[in-house]
Amino acid sequence: MRIILYLSGEFEELARIEAETFLSRVLLADRQITVGECGFNRFERFGLIHEASLHLFSCESNELHDFFREVEIPDGKCCVRVRNIGEKKADSTKLERELGAILWKRGAKISVSNPEYIYRVYLANKAHVGILLHVTDRKQFLERRPDLKPFFRPGAILPRLARSLVNIALKEGTLLDPMCGTGTIIIEAGLMGLNFLGIEAYSNIARGCKINLHHYGLPSNILIGDARNLPLKDESVDAIVTDFPYLQSTKALGDLLDLYEKSLSEFKRVLKPNCRLIFISNLDVEETVKNFEIKYKLYQRLHKSLTRRIYICLNS
């Protein structure tokens, strides 16, 4: 099945990597659009992917009317919805009416208010047309904002980012967050139906994390422990996703580098071969990650004094 994935423009580079985890083969990329062969259809797991559509065709924008004169018409009620993604903005309402009229003249049952099938037209550098399969409920991520959880501490990453990283890390198996904090990463993993384990060094934060897990109906899979000395067997987890503490003062640099060196050694030990480690940092730590293959390093600027680095690594 060939599908169109409509990506978030908020962190497009990461969204594109996430999209690749749902595809067995990427056929083309065009701004916030990726087209490819579907390899994993758990669309409800999307983080930074807004929509999935069954790909019908891609063409130049000025060829749309001709293609709609040939496109297959479904048995049920249908309509056309246009999304502008490129720099040149078309009159989407006018185009929807024109393309819908072509379908109607060919015998299609048109229903704007209650369609069974939606022809989704994405206008990027080219036009990409499909039948809409899935729309991500983005409201859910706002409802799970860190500050709306029962236990909150500043600095937690947003659920959409956490979910995207979990998707990139693994399709199935057990995910470990060895510095789980308030639990954003393991909560998203749990809500996606994955096995998870969180480890937290501070007992009061671990208790708060358990409260958050209980709030979402998830098991309290939390251990109090040190990421530098994990209470786990060798090669016992399928992925590690974590957010390192951020350097706030140069006085703490030595302690933080010690945490990186010792914890990354432990991550190497407990992670299965050819599985992924993904971590967030506010430091450039390539030298410390020498035992892993860095597949991607992405930057996310939050404000003038904080730029996140997202390392996506393979335990090769």
Image: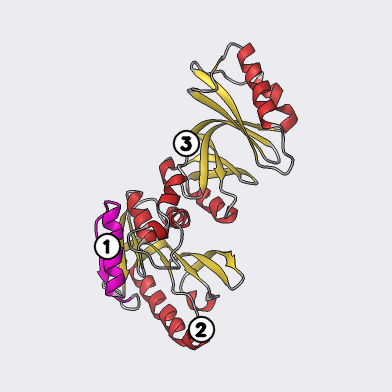
Residue assigned mark 2: 249
Does the stretch in magenta take in 255?
no
The image quarter in which residue 208 lies: bottom left
Give the numbered dot on residue 242.
none
**Image coords of residue 270 (percent x, y):** 33, 69
**Image coords of residue 26 (percent x, y):** 57, 44
Q: Look at label 3 and name its amino acid.
A: His
Classify residue 116 as left or right of residue 91: left
Does the stretch in magenta take in 212?
yes
Q: Secondary structure at mark 1?
A: helix
**135, above or below 68, in the image:** below
Q: Residues within 10 Å of mark 3 (few under 14, many from 20)?
A: some
226 and 25: which one is in front? 226
Residue assigned mark 1: 210
**266, above or below 147, in the image:** below
Q: Residues within 10 Å of mark 1 (few under 14, many from 20)?
A: some
Give the numbered dot on residue 134.
3
Contact between labelled residues 3 and 2, with CB atoms less than 8 Å apart: no
Q: Look at label 2 and name its amino acid.
A: Ser
